[in-house]
Image (cartoon, grey):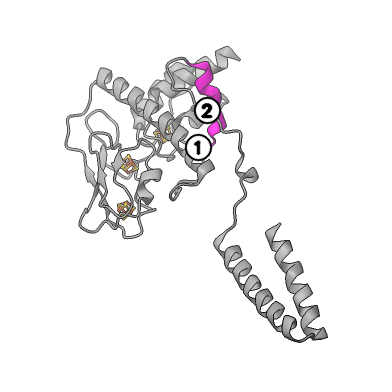
Amino acid sequence: MNSQISLIQQIDALLPQTQCGLCGHRDGCLPYAQSIAQGEAANKCVPGGQPVADALAQLLNREQLVAEESVWAIQSDGRPQRMKAIIREDECIGCTKCISACPVDAIIGSGKLMHTILTDLCTGCELCIPPCPVDCIDLVEDTQAIPDELHRIAEQDDLRQRYYSHIQREEKRRIHRKGPVVRAEIDTQLFAQFSTQIQELPSIQLSDKSPESTPTIDAKTTIELAKLRTQIKKLEKQLSVRMDEKKQIQLNELQQQLSALQS
Ligand code: SF4
Ligand code: SF4
Ligand code: SF4
């Protein structure tokens, strides 16, 4: 078990930590690292390109595979072009949807106010683009110098830490339902389990409350409940003035519908 955790950790250390999901693992680098340790091909990290595919093949003593192709041109270090997202701020309506979509918390802003991307932190993962209702986020080429190995490792460590903090915050939001949660739900349990095994990672506290145990009523049900209550009140009023058998039956039916919806 410990050797498996250590292998997953070594694999994860080679992955770029942009958490983009382009490898087919929605929740980012760690689930892909786990799957590679269980035998999945190690050439699917798109931002990592050929250097990451080769480093993984070497670590795992597997044959070298051609890396999954990127839509971006290849840089001098063999990896795809680094990108950054930029918000066209005069078009931003401050809906906050991009904030919870960003895995590394690189976007600042609050409700109804213009939002800004902290360019240094942005990895160009593109996850903030689909949720934006006014399509005001662009991707541009990163013009900063390509980081050397030392800087890359430091950057990856920082992104990993930021992602764990993001997961912890989203876990709290999921329970308390504050603001829009745009990204598909993250498998928090996997990250929490991993964070207990590795000292350098921020610990993730799982909430006792599962989403199923949180009572929630969707908008459609709320409207239906309001309609039923109005009809019931109207009938009760009419029946208090004059008894009517048909209306009494109708009232009983509506009351049954109301209690069924409420439960
Ligand atoms: S950076 Fe690579 S390993 Fe991480 S989520 Fe993106 S494609 Fe997957
Ligand atoms: S700002 Fe957008 S592109 Fe940049 S890291 Fe966050 S989600 Fe990814
Ligand atoms: S999703 Fe788009 S409109 Fe909404 S806050 Fe973000 S950038 Fe602005």
Instruction: Identify the residue shown where x is 55% and y is 31%.
Output: 206
What residue did someone put label 1 on?
A: 171
The type of residue carrying mark 2 is: Gln
Give the mark nearest the N terminus, 2 or 1: 1
Question: Quadrant location of residue 151?
Answer: top left
Q: Quadrant of the N terminus?
A: top right
Q: Residues within 10 Å of mark 1 (few under 14, many from 20)?
A: many
Instruction: Identify the residue shown where x is 21% and y is 28%.
Output: 146
Q: Position of residue 85 (x, y in %)?
A: 26, 45
Whether 189 is among the magenta residues is yes
In the rendered structure, are the residues bearing label 2 and label 1 in contact, judged by CB atoms less than 8 Å apart?
yes
Q: Which mark is residue 205?
A: 2
Which stretch is magenta? Answer: 186-198
Tell me the element at label 2. Answer: loop
Confirm or reject: label 2 Cβ below 8 Å from ligand 1. Answer: no
Q: Position of residue 50 (x, y in %)?
A: 35, 30
The type of residue carrying mark 1 is: Glu
Residue nearer the viewer, 123 or 251: 251
Question: Quadrant location of residue 244?
Answer: bottom right
* Residue 25 visible, this angle: no
* Residue 70 visible, this angle: yes
Residue 216 to residue 105: above or below: below
